[in-house]
């Protein structure tokens, strides 16, 4: 069992406007890209569970050309609202970093 | 077929962050058609739009504008700034114009200046809403006539047309209120018959300045040469390199969808875009498409005042408190609420009291999955109330109550919170929320954007 960061060269999150979050997961090689896709560690369902959103709200893109998985979800707390913890959305990727990936 | 080539220079990703002077000088000397710069974003939250305060530093913005204006005026080319003063509202535009006029006076510069106002009066927006011209994106806060009138400020995000109108009217310097980042760079090329597919895609790559480089060493300039078939992007700074990977990857940045960007007037589709290396540091981009939309819409941004915030910061180090932190905080809350009610006659629903526990779940809130806390945590007691003085008055009640809140293992009066500052309370000012995520359907793209021309 390895963790997602061992397959990637970049895992980041950021606001896509104040109402959405977007995650860019860029892989080191085609092999690691394929390994993670095959493992099903990263799926719309997994994201919905981790981020407590409806799976239907998870936009999930496999960008072959860039060996990248891009995911966008609605923010449960809009940027800057009283209970927000991360105005820029820059640390919401952190639960993904050590996500277990089955070999 | 027109043979026009347009060289677009992006001064930097945000007018307040800066760039290397030598990079800009070089970029313009190599032959530039215009210099553009984005000055705003909603990324830093609703405060700037709500309060009308620009985000500085003023001296930094002035330095950057001075260099951009100096080089552009020397070369006789236009300058296009979008989303002035960070939020692009009327006070933000006025602040930026004041800096431009000051620079013109100080350097004896003369040019035709266009200011494009993108603030939308609440009456105008409410009328548009009641006519059914405002439709929600997803997700969107609930909106009605009352919510519109209760808000502090709205701006509409202009597309390319108001900028083109200002350029056609002879403006050399265009300072825009809230503006699509891409429109800053697409307006002039499209006016000179560059296809929208090329112009908008180049705009997306340019809008963050040097961010599309393989390694953005520091904020800096970026150049794109646009023609009928595509564009070539190249950093003017020889220390910075673009690669096909870095440019393609930048197209993803801050977009919800990697292939499709919705702009006023149509969608940019980069599904079939090709990125090829040209020499050491340039990248040629071709193959994107632009599909005009049936309706012309502009995005509306708005902010509503929610209350005023005061906070106090404390450390917790006692292992006995830490091992029962949840209970400690959940039993502390009603004691604070009771004291506030007794002394200020304020019920708990009249203010928000939020314990932010750094070292446990301060960053992720209820999404945190790691349950063990470390050997200490940082606590922010965060109060938002109807006025600053009410918020400020709740803080000493909360902090003093928290300080002596008991745990069973220690008998007698104890002090469980370590406050680093005296006074402990910090007034953080007004709190706003983004209150709209909607688009406005326009019959004429320039209609809500009043442009004022001025000869300096």
Image (cartoon, rainbow, N blue to C red):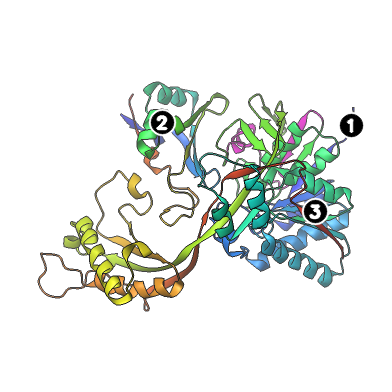
Q: Which residues are magenta?
A: B228-253
Magenta span includes A35: no
- Please give the name of the residue rendered at 35% of the width and 44% of the height, measured from the top-left corner: B367
Relative to residue B7, is residue A6 depicted above or below?
above
**Chain bearing mark 2:** A
Magenta span has B230? Answer: yes
Quarter of the figure with residue B341: bottom left
Q: Name the residue that disc number 2 marks.
A: A55
Does B55 sit left or right of B295 as displayed? left
Q: Residue at x 40, y 43 (%)?
A: A94
- The mark found on residue B79 in the picture is 3
Q: In the rendered image, which residue does mark 1 sit on?
A: B3
Q: For mark 3, name the chain.
A: B
Q: Are marks 2 and 3 in contact (CB under 8 Å)?
A: no
Q: Is residue B335 left or right of residue B270?
A: left
Q: Are marks 1 and 2 on the same chain?
A: no
The outermost residue toward the front is: B130
Judging depth in this view, the residue of B157 and B447 nearest the camera is B447
State the separation of the CA atoms marked 2 and 3: 45 Å
State the SS at label 2.
Answer: helix
Q: Identify the disc placed on residue A88.
A: none
Please provide percent x and percent y for residue B404.
21, 72
């Amino acid at each position: 069992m390895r963790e997602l960061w061992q397959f990637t060269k970049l895992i980041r999150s950021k606001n896509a406007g104040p109402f959405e979050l977007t995650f860019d997961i860029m892989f080191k090689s085609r092999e690691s890209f394929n390994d993670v896709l095959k493992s099903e560690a990263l799926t719309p369902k997994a994201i919905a569970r981790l981020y407590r959103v409806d799976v239907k709200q998870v936009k999930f893109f496999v960008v072959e050309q860039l060996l990248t998985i891009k995911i966008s979800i609605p923010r449960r707390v809009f940027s800057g609202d009283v209970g927000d913890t991360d105005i820029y959305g820059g640390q919401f990727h952190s639960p993904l970093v050590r996500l277990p990936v089955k070999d | 077929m027109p043979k026009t080539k347009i060289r677009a220079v992006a001064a930097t990703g945000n007018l307040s962050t800066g760039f290397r002077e030598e990079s800009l000088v070089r970029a313009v000397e190599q032959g530039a058609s215009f210099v553009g710069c984005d000055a705003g974003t909603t990324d830093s939250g609703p405060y700037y739009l709500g309060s009308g305060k620009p985000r500085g530093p003023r001296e930094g913005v002035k330095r950057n504008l001075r260099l951009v204006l100096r080089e552009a005026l020397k070369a006789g080319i236009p300058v296009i700034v979008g989303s002035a003063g960070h939020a692009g509202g009327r006070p933000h535009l006025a602040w930026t114009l004041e800096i431009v006029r000051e620079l013109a006076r100080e350097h004896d510069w003369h040019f035709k200046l266009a200011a494009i106002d993108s603030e939308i009066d609440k009456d105008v927006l409410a009328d548009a809403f009641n006519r059914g011209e405002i439709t929600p994106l997803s997700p969107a806060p609930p909106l009605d006539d009352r919510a519109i009138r209760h808000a502090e400020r709205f701006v509409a995000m202009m597309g390319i047309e108001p900028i083109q109108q200002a350029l056609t009217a002879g403006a050399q310097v265009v300072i825009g209120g809230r503006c699509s980042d891409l429109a800053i760079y697409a307006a002039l090329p499209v006016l000179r018959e560059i296809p929208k597919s090329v112009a908008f895609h180049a705009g997306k790559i340019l809008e963050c300045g040097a961010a599309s480089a393989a390694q953005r060493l520091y904020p800096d300039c970026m150049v794109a040469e646009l023609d009928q078939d595509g564009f070539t992007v190249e950093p003017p700074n020889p220390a910075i390199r673009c690669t096909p990977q870095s440019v393609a990857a930048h197209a993803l940045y801050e977009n919800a969808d990697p292939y499709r960007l919705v702009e006023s007037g149509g969608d940019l589709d980069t599904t079939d875009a090709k990125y090829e290396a040209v020499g050491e540091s340039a990248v040629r981009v071709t193959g994107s498409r632009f599909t005009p939309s049936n309706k012309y819409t502009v995005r509306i941004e708005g902010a509503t005042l929610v209350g005023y915030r005061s906070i106090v910061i404390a450390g917790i180090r006692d292992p006995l408190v830490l091992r029962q932190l949840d209970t400690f905080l959940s039993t502390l809350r009603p004691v604070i609420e009771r004291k506030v009610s007794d002394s200020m006659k304020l019920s708990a629903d009249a203010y928000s009291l939020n314990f932010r526990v750094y070292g446990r779940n301060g960053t992720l809130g209820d999404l945190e999955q790691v349950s063990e806390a470390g050997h200490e945590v940082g606590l922010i007691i965060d109060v938002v109330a109807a006025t600053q003085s009410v918020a400020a008055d709740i803080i000493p009640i909360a902090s003093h109550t928290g300080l002596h809140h008991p745990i069973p293992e220690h008998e007698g009066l104890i002090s469980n919170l370590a406050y680093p500052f005296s006074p402990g309370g910090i007034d953080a000012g007004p709190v706003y929320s983004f209150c709209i995520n909607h688009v406005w359907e326009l019959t004429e793209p320039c209609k809500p954007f009043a442009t004022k021309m001025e000869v300096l």
